[in-house]
Image: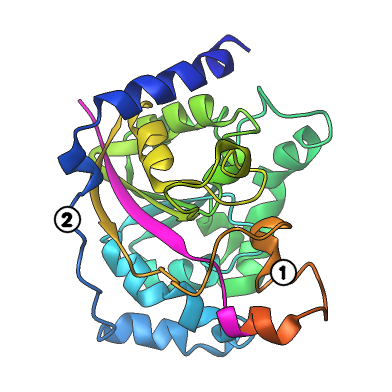
Amino acid sequence: MRHAALLPALLLAAAAALPAALHAAPEAPAASTADPAMAKVLADPRRDGDRVRDPFRHPAETLAFFRIKPGMTVADYMPSSGWFTRILVPYLGDKGTYIGITAGTATATAEMKPRLLAFPGAFPGKAAGWTGVAAERIPAFTLDAVPPERKGTVDRVMIMREVHNMWPDNFLYNDLAAIRALLKDDGLLGIEEHRAKADAPASYTLGTMGYMREADVIALIEAHGFRLVAKSEINANPKDSANWPDGVWTLPPVLTLKDKDRAKYEAIGESDRMTLIFAKRS
Protein backbone atom coordinates (compact mmCIF):
# COMPACT_ATOMS: atom_id res chain seq x y z
CA MET A 1 0.00 0.00 0.00
CA ARG A 2 1.46 3.37 -0.98
CA HIS A 3 0.77 5.11 2.34
CA ALA A 4 2.24 2.23 4.31
CA ALA A 5 5.38 2.31 2.19
CA LEU A 6 5.85 5.98 2.98
CA LEU A 7 5.67 5.49 6.76
CA PRO A 8 9.36 4.69 7.38
CA ALA A 9 10.38 7.86 5.55
CA LEU A 10 7.82 9.88 7.50
CA LEU A 11 9.16 8.47 10.75
CA LEU A 12 12.74 9.37 9.92
CA ALA A 13 11.78 12.85 8.79
CA ALA A 14 9.68 13.52 11.86
CA ALA A 15 12.35 12.26 14.22
CA ALA A 16 14.94 14.49 12.59
CA ALA A 17 12.66 17.50 12.81
CA LEU A 18 11.74 17.09 16.47
CA PRO A 19 13.63 19.57 18.64
CA ALA A 20 15.33 18.17 21.72
CA ALA A 21 13.08 20.25 23.94
CA LEU A 22 10.04 18.45 22.59
CA HIS A 23 11.44 15.02 23.41
CA ALA A 24 11.88 16.41 26.92
CA ALA A 25 8.29 17.62 27.19
CA PRO A 26 7.32 18.49 30.74
CA GLU A 27 6.31 15.51 32.79
CA ALA A 28 2.88 15.92 34.30
CA PRO A 29 2.61 15.34 38.03
CA ALA A 30 0.85 12.22 39.22
CA ALA A 31 -2.88 12.85 39.28
CA SER A 32 -4.85 12.86 42.50
CA THR A 33 -7.08 9.85 43.12
CA ALA A 34 -9.44 11.95 45.26
CA ASP A 35 -12.17 12.14 42.61
CA PRO A 36 -15.17 10.61 44.42
CA ALA A 37 -16.92 9.70 41.14
CA MET A 38 -13.87 7.77 40.00
CA ALA A 39 -13.46 6.12 43.40
CA LYS A 40 -17.05 4.89 43.22
CA VAL A 41 -16.54 3.44 39.74
CA LEU A 42 -13.32 1.68 40.69
CA ALA A 43 -15.03 0.08 43.70
CA ASP A 44 -18.00 -1.21 41.68
CA PRO A 45 -18.50 -5.00 42.02
CA ARG A 46 -18.57 -5.29 38.22
CA ARG A 47 -14.82 -4.65 38.40
CA ASP A 48 -14.03 -7.35 40.94
CA GLY A 49 -12.10 -9.32 38.33
CA ASP A 50 -10.27 -6.22 37.06
CA ARG A 51 -9.14 -4.70 40.33
CA VAL A 52 -6.07 -6.90 40.75
CA ARG A 53 -4.46 -4.95 37.89
CA ASP A 54 -5.20 -1.47 39.26
CA PRO A 55 -1.77 -1.16 40.95
CA PHE A 56 -0.13 -1.68 37.55
CA ARG A 57 -2.56 0.14 35.26
CA HIS A 58 -3.26 3.17 37.49
CA PRO A 59 -6.68 3.90 35.99
CA ALA A 60 -7.56 6.97 38.08
CA GLU A 61 -4.20 8.62 37.48
CA THR A 62 -4.07 7.70 33.79
CA LEU A 63 -7.54 9.00 32.96
CA ALA A 64 -6.91 12.16 34.96
CA PHE A 65 -3.67 12.68 33.03
CA PHE A 66 -5.66 12.32 29.80
CA ARG A 67 -7.92 15.09 31.22
CA ILE A 68 -11.02 12.93 30.94
CA LYS A 69 -14.04 14.14 32.90
CA PRO A 70 -17.69 13.08 33.29
CA GLY A 71 -19.89 14.34 30.47
CA MET A 72 -17.21 14.03 27.79
CA THR A 73 -17.30 11.97 24.61
CA VAL A 74 -14.43 9.46 24.68
CA ALA A 75 -13.48 6.95 21.97
CA ASP A 76 -11.53 3.86 23.02
CA TYR A 77 -9.44 2.19 20.29
CA MET A 78 -9.60 -1.62 20.22
CA PRO A 79 -11.17 -1.96 23.68
CA SER A 80 -10.68 -5.72 23.64
CA SER A 81 -12.15 -7.35 26.76
CA GLY A 82 -13.38 -4.04 28.16
CA TRP A 83 -11.02 -3.29 31.04
CA PHE A 84 -11.34 0.48 30.50
CA THR A 85 -14.91 0.14 29.18
CA ARG A 86 -16.04 -0.92 32.64
CA ILE A 87 -14.51 2.26 34.05
CA LEU A 88 -15.32 4.82 31.39
CA VAL A 89 -18.97 4.03 30.65
CA PRO A 90 -20.14 4.66 34.24
CA TYR A 91 -17.60 7.42 34.85
CA LEU A 92 -18.63 9.49 31.83
CA GLY A 93 -22.21 9.22 33.07
CA ASP A 94 -25.56 9.93 31.47
CA LYS A 95 -24.33 13.17 29.89
CA GLY A 96 -21.20 11.56 28.46
CA THR A 97 -20.66 9.12 25.61
CA TYR A 98 -18.29 6.18 25.38
CA ILE A 99 -17.52 4.99 21.83
CA GLY A 100 -15.82 1.75 20.91
CA ILE A 101 -13.65 2.09 17.81
CA THR A 102 -11.52 -0.41 15.99
CA ALA A 103 -9.15 -0.49 13.04
CA GLY A 104 -10.33 0.15 9.53
CA THR A 105 -10.44 -2.83 7.20
CA ALA A 106 -8.53 -1.42 4.21
CA THR A 107 -5.17 -2.84 5.28
CA ALA A 108 -6.48 -5.74 7.36
CA THR A 109 -5.41 -9.28 6.62
CA ALA A 110 -8.00 -11.77 5.42
CA GLU A 111 -7.84 -13.40 8.85
CA MET A 112 -8.40 -10.15 10.74
CA LYS A 113 -11.03 -8.52 8.52
CA PRO A 114 -14.06 -10.60 9.65
CA ARG A 115 -13.33 -9.80 13.29
CA LEU A 116 -13.10 -6.08 12.56
CA LEU A 117 -16.31 -6.11 10.52
CA ALA A 118 -18.12 -7.90 13.35
CA PHE A 119 -17.04 -5.35 15.95
CA PRO A 120 -19.72 -2.64 15.42
CA GLY A 121 -22.51 -5.16 15.82
CA ALA A 122 -21.01 -7.19 18.66
CA PHE A 123 -19.33 -4.66 20.91
CA PRO A 124 -22.33 -2.62 22.17
CA GLY A 125 -23.99 -5.75 23.51
CA LYS A 126 -20.81 -6.89 25.22
CA ALA A 127 -20.29 -3.45 26.74
CA ALA A 128 -23.89 -3.40 27.94
CA GLY A 129 -23.34 -6.71 29.70
CA TRP A 130 -20.16 -5.40 31.33
CA THR A 131 -21.63 -2.11 32.52
CA GLY A 132 -25.42 -2.39 32.79
CA VAL A 133 -25.84 0.52 30.37
CA ALA A 134 -28.12 -0.03 27.37
CA ALA A 135 -26.33 -1.12 24.20
CA GLU A 136 -28.06 1.70 22.31
CA ARG A 137 -26.04 4.20 24.36
CA ILE A 138 -22.68 2.63 23.42
CA PRO A 139 -21.91 3.28 19.74
CA ALA A 140 -19.18 1.34 17.98
CA PHE A 141 -17.68 1.47 14.49
CA THR A 142 -14.61 0.71 12.44
CA LEU A 143 -12.43 3.67 11.54
CA ASP A 144 -13.14 3.34 7.83
CA ALA A 145 -16.86 3.67 8.53
CA VAL A 146 -17.03 6.67 10.84
CA PRO A 147 -20.57 8.11 10.89
CA PRO A 148 -20.38 11.63 9.42
CA GLU A 149 -22.21 13.10 12.42
CA ARG A 150 -19.45 11.84 14.74
CA LYS A 151 -16.66 13.75 13.01
CA GLY A 152 -15.34 16.64 15.07
CA THR A 153 -17.40 15.67 18.14
CA VAL A 154 -15.00 13.61 20.27
CA ASP A 155 -13.19 15.11 23.27
CA ARG A 156 -10.67 12.32 23.81
CA VAL A 157 -9.42 9.27 21.97
CA MET A 158 -7.46 6.60 23.84
CA ILE A 159 -5.03 4.14 22.26
CA MET A 160 -4.02 1.83 25.06
CA ARG A 161 -1.08 -0.45 24.27
CA GLU A 162 -1.97 -0.83 20.61
CA VAL A 163 0.60 1.26 18.70
CA HIS A 164 2.89 -1.78 18.59
CA ASN A 165 0.13 -3.56 16.64
CA MET A 166 -0.88 -0.59 14.49
CA TRP A 167 2.68 -0.05 13.22
CA PRO A 168 3.54 -3.49 11.78
CA ASP A 169 -0.05 -4.17 10.72
CA ASN A 170 -0.15 -0.98 8.59
CA PHE A 171 -3.09 0.58 10.44
CA LEU A 172 -1.32 3.76 11.55
CA TYR A 173 -1.83 5.97 8.51
CA ASN A 174 -5.54 5.38 7.95
CA ASP A 175 -6.55 5.01 11.58
CA LEU A 176 -4.74 8.10 12.83
CA ALA A 177 -6.25 10.13 9.99
CA ALA A 178 -9.71 8.94 11.05
CA ILE A 179 -8.97 9.63 14.72
CA ARG A 180 -7.81 13.12 13.85
CA ALA A 181 -11.09 13.72 12.02
CA LEU A 182 -13.10 12.40 14.98
CA LEU A 183 -11.52 14.77 17.49
CA LYS A 184 -12.78 18.25 18.22
CA ASP A 185 -10.33 21.04 17.43
CA ASP A 186 -9.31 21.08 21.10
CA GLY A 187 -9.58 17.31 21.51
CA LEU A 188 -6.70 15.18 22.77
CA LEU A 189 -5.25 11.79 21.91
CA GLY A 190 -4.01 9.76 24.88
CA ILE A 191 -1.56 6.94 24.27
CA GLU A 192 -0.14 4.29 26.55
CA GLU A 193 2.48 1.95 25.11
CA HIS A 194 5.01 -0.64 26.31
CA ARG A 195 8.37 1.15 26.43
CA ALA A 196 11.61 -0.24 25.10
CA LYS A 197 14.92 1.13 26.29
CA ALA A 198 16.04 4.21 24.37
CA ASP A 199 19.00 2.31 22.91
CA ALA A 200 17.12 -0.89 22.10
CA PRO A 201 17.89 -2.21 18.60
CA ALA A 202 15.43 -1.81 15.76
CA SER A 203 15.04 -5.57 15.58
CA TYR A 204 13.38 -5.44 19.01
CA THR A 205 11.30 -2.29 18.62
CA LEU A 206 9.28 -2.72 15.43
CA GLY A 207 6.23 -3.86 17.38
CA THR A 208 6.47 -7.63 17.18
CA MET A 209 7.92 -7.83 20.70
CA GLY A 210 5.29 -5.45 22.09
CA TYR A 211 7.83 -2.79 23.03
CA MET A 212 8.55 0.46 21.20
CA ARG A 213 11.00 3.29 21.86
CA GLU A 214 9.32 6.41 23.21
CA ALA A 215 11.05 8.66 20.69
CA ASP A 216 9.77 6.46 17.85
CA VAL A 217 6.19 6.57 19.08
CA ILE A 218 6.31 10.35 19.42
CA ALA A 219 7.77 10.71 15.93
CA LEU A 220 5.18 8.38 14.40
CA ILE A 221 2.21 10.12 15.97
CA GLU A 222 3.53 13.58 15.14
CA ALA A 223 4.13 12.52 11.54
CA HIS A 224 0.38 11.92 11.31
CA GLY A 225 -0.83 15.38 12.22
CA PHE A 226 -0.43 15.60 15.99
CA ARG A 227 1.94 17.32 18.42
CA LEU A 228 3.11 16.10 21.80
CA VAL A 229 1.52 18.00 24.69
CA ALA A 230 2.80 16.16 27.75
CA LYS A 231 4.12 12.85 28.99
CA SER A 232 3.93 11.13 32.34
CA GLU A 233 5.69 8.38 34.28
CA ILE A 234 2.40 7.22 35.84
CA ASN A 235 2.79 3.78 34.26
CA ALA A 236 6.57 3.45 34.52
CA ASN A 237 8.05 0.25 35.94
CA PRO A 238 11.83 0.40 36.47
CA LYS A 239 11.85 -3.32 37.30
CA ASP A 240 11.07 -4.15 33.68
CA SER A 241 14.31 -4.66 31.71
CA ALA A 242 12.24 -4.61 28.48
CA ASN A 243 14.46 -7.14 26.74
CA TRP A 244 12.62 -10.43 27.17
CA PRO A 245 13.22 -13.01 24.38
CA ASP A 246 9.47 -13.66 24.23
CA GLY A 247 8.62 -9.97 24.35
CA VAL A 248 6.31 -8.12 26.69
CA TRP A 249 4.03 -11.14 27.01
CA THR A 250 6.67 -12.77 29.24
CA LEU A 251 5.38 -10.52 32.02
CA PRO A 252 1.94 -10.43 33.67
CA PRO A 253 -0.85 -10.64 32.87
CA VAL A 254 -0.05 -13.00 29.96
CA LEU A 255 2.95 -14.91 31.42
CA THR A 256 3.70 -16.86 28.24
CA LEU A 257 6.23 -19.06 30.04
CA LYS A 258 3.46 -20.31 32.35
CA ASP A 259 5.02 -21.60 35.58
CA LYS A 260 8.64 -21.21 34.47
CA ASP A 261 10.14 -18.45 36.66
CA ARG A 262 6.58 -17.33 37.39
CA ALA A 263 7.45 -15.84 40.78
CA LYS A 264 10.24 -13.79 39.16
CA TYR A 265 7.95 -12.27 36.55
CA GLU A 266 5.12 -11.66 38.98
CA ALA A 267 7.56 -9.81 41.24
CA ILE A 268 8.49 -7.56 38.28
CA GLY A 269 4.84 -6.88 37.49
CA GLU A 270 3.43 -5.47 34.28
CA SER A 271 5.54 -3.71 31.68
CA ASP A 272 7.24 -0.34 31.81
CA ARG A 273 5.02 1.99 29.80
CA MET A 274 5.08 5.48 28.35
CA THR A 275 1.95 7.61 28.81
CA LEU A 276 1.57 10.45 26.33
CA ILE A 277 -0.93 13.16 25.33
CA PHE A 278 -1.13 14.63 21.82
CA ALA A 279 -3.16 17.48 20.35
CA LYS A 280 -4.22 17.95 16.73
CA ARG A 281 -1.72 20.02 14.79
CA SER A 282 -3.26 22.77 12.68
Residue beneath disc 1: 254
162 relative to 49 in the view: left or right = left
Q: Is residue 271 magenta?
A: yes
Numbered disc 2: secondary structure: loop
Q: Residue at x 34, y 70 (%)?
A: 234
Residue beneath disc 2: 26
Bounds of the magenta segment = 267-282
Instruction: Looking at the picture, tell me which residue is in the foreground, 261 or 124.
Output: 261
In the rendered image, the residue lying farthest to the top is 2
Number of residues whose C-alpha sits closer than 10 Å to that of mark 2, classed few (under 14), some (14–19) or many (20 or more):
few
193 relative to 5 in the view: left or right = left
Camera sees residue 167: yes
Say if 56 sits above or below 144 in the image. Answer: below
Instruction: Looking at the picture, tell me which residue is in the foreground, 190 or 88.
Output: 190
Report how far apart the C-alphas of labels 2 and 1 lie in the structure: 32 Å
Q: What amino acid is at disc 1?
A: Val
Residue 84 percent location from the top left of the image: 51, 66
Instruction: Looking at the picture, tell me which residue is in the foreground, 170 or 280.
Output: 170
Q: Residue at x 33, y 73 (%)?
A: 61
Q: What amino acid is at disc 2?
A: Pro
Location of the C terminus by quadrant is top left
Residue 165 percent location from the top left of the image: 62, 42
Q: Look at the numbered discs 2 and 1 and tell me whether their residues touch, using CB distance below 8 Å.
A: no
Number of residues whose C-alpha sits closer than 10 Å to that of mark 1, classed few (under 14), some (14–19) or many (20 or more):
few
Location of the N terminus by quadrant is top right
- Which of the marked residues, 2 or 1, is nearer the chain's N terminus? 2
**Res. 119 image quadrant:** top right
